Amino acid sequence: MTVLVRIVAALMYRFLSLFPPNYRREYQEERACVLRLALEERAAHGYLPLLRFCARELRDLPAAILRAHWREWRKKMNGSRQSASLSENGLKGWHLLWFVFPFLVTIIIPLAGLVGPGFWIPSVPLLIITVIVAVAGFTRGVPRWALPSLGLAISLANLLIMQATFMRAGGSDLLVRLKAVLWTDVMVERVLYALISNAVYLAPAVLILLLLALVAITLPGLPLLRDQLAQTWTVLPFLLYTTSLLTPFITTDVYQGLALYQLLFLLLLVIGAWFYLRASRPAVQMTALLVATLLCGVVLSLGIYLVYPQQSWIYRAGAFPRWWETLGPLLETAVRLAALVLLAVVARWQVGRSQASQVASLNP
């Protein structure tokens, strides 16, 4: 009987290998011990009880294996969702609403061009609410649900700085002198001037983000933002990404009939932000931001190319040709992509320093 018990136990142990690895590591020894004791107990009463026990175990085994694999899969899915979430507790309820709120506010504006002029009126109080959310998030240390609102507020600040500094009558002396040198019939020089001017216009937002990161790292007032900057290097690029919410209205303000393309621009921003939320690895998050930014520029450039003949001002003296107007959003996108990469490099360097300092503190 002892030899038979050992043979049956060896066969039953084989079936334990069908359970998932984590389950085996946690329960295999316990189940093997319980199985051996149960087999010895049934064998002590004869062959028939032993056969009944084995038949019952074999009957229940497939369902137990399936349940174990199902629980293992559920744990992996929950773990991936938690790691992909933008906060430790996830973005749920009001937090998720505050995260998508700036996107909804700006989407209303091009919808007004498609539905009717009065449709944009609700965007004014909603924009005020967005600024309030940004301020509230800043006072709480910038939790991740406040990042898009903060990005939109930074874009508004960037616009005010542009108007106060670079968009005065006569413009900036630096840009005026630069235009006098580069604005010739040579296309390369014109493109260079456009790239430099776009970089100048985007510089306030980049400097604000770098200053914000410096404050979060050196001062104790923004602990949540400091933790995020220490964990991943995509937070600063994402903040700059959200400043694109006003881009289709600033760069195409002289155009009529672009509402559909502006709406597509904003929807692509939403899709990029959604992929950013779902991705668990920083490299994938950064790829989502770069691809969405590039597609936004292409959509806006295509829209300008298609509606250009419908504009009344193109027949005036000094109007820019179609090819140049079409190229404008692509050049602005190129500068924005470069700024995203720059912030990613700076943030990744800082994350590396933070992790190195943590390791050094653990290993004095």
Image (cartoon, rainbow, N blue to C red):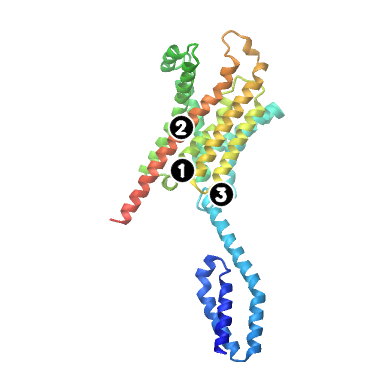
Q: Position of residue 148 (x, y in %)?
A: 53, 39
Tell me how far mark 1 sits from mark 3, CA to CA: 19 Å
Q: Is residue 135 left or right of residue 174?
A: right
**Residue at the spot of label 3:** 91
In this view, the residue in front, 83 or 24, is 24
25 over 360 or under it: above or below? below
Rendered-image quadrant of the N terminus: bottom right
In this view, the residue in front, 337 or 270, is 337
Tell me how far mark 1 sits from mark 2, CA to CA: 27 Å
Q: Position of residue 247 (x, y in %)?
A: 55, 28
Tag 2 or tag 3, which sits nearer the N-term? Answer: 3
Characterize the local packing of mark 3: few (<14), some (14-19) or many (20 or more) Cα atoms within 10 angstroms.
some
Q: Nearer the viewer, mark 3 or mark 2?
A: 2
**Residue at the spot of label 1:** 139
Q: Amino acid at mark 1?
A: Thr
Residue depicted at 58% across the width and 34% down the height: 127
Q: Amino acid at mark 2?
A: Ala
What is the residue that sits farthest to the top in this orientation? 317
In this view, the residue in front, 43 or 222, is 43
Tell me how far mark 3 sits from mark 2, CA to CA: 27 Å
Answer whether residue 363 is visible to the viewer in this image: yes
Q: Position of residue 177 (x, y in %)?
A: 41, 13
Tag 2 or tag 1, which sits nearer the N-term? Answer: 1
Characterize the local packing of mark 2: few (<14), some (14-19) or many (20 or more) Cα atoms within 10 angstroms.
many
Answer whether residue 152 is visible to the viewer in this image: no
The disc placed on residue 339 is: 2
Residue depicted at 59% across the width and 41% down the height: 100
Residue depicted at 38% across the width and 42% down the height: 350
Q: Position of residue 94 (x, y in %)?
A: 58, 47
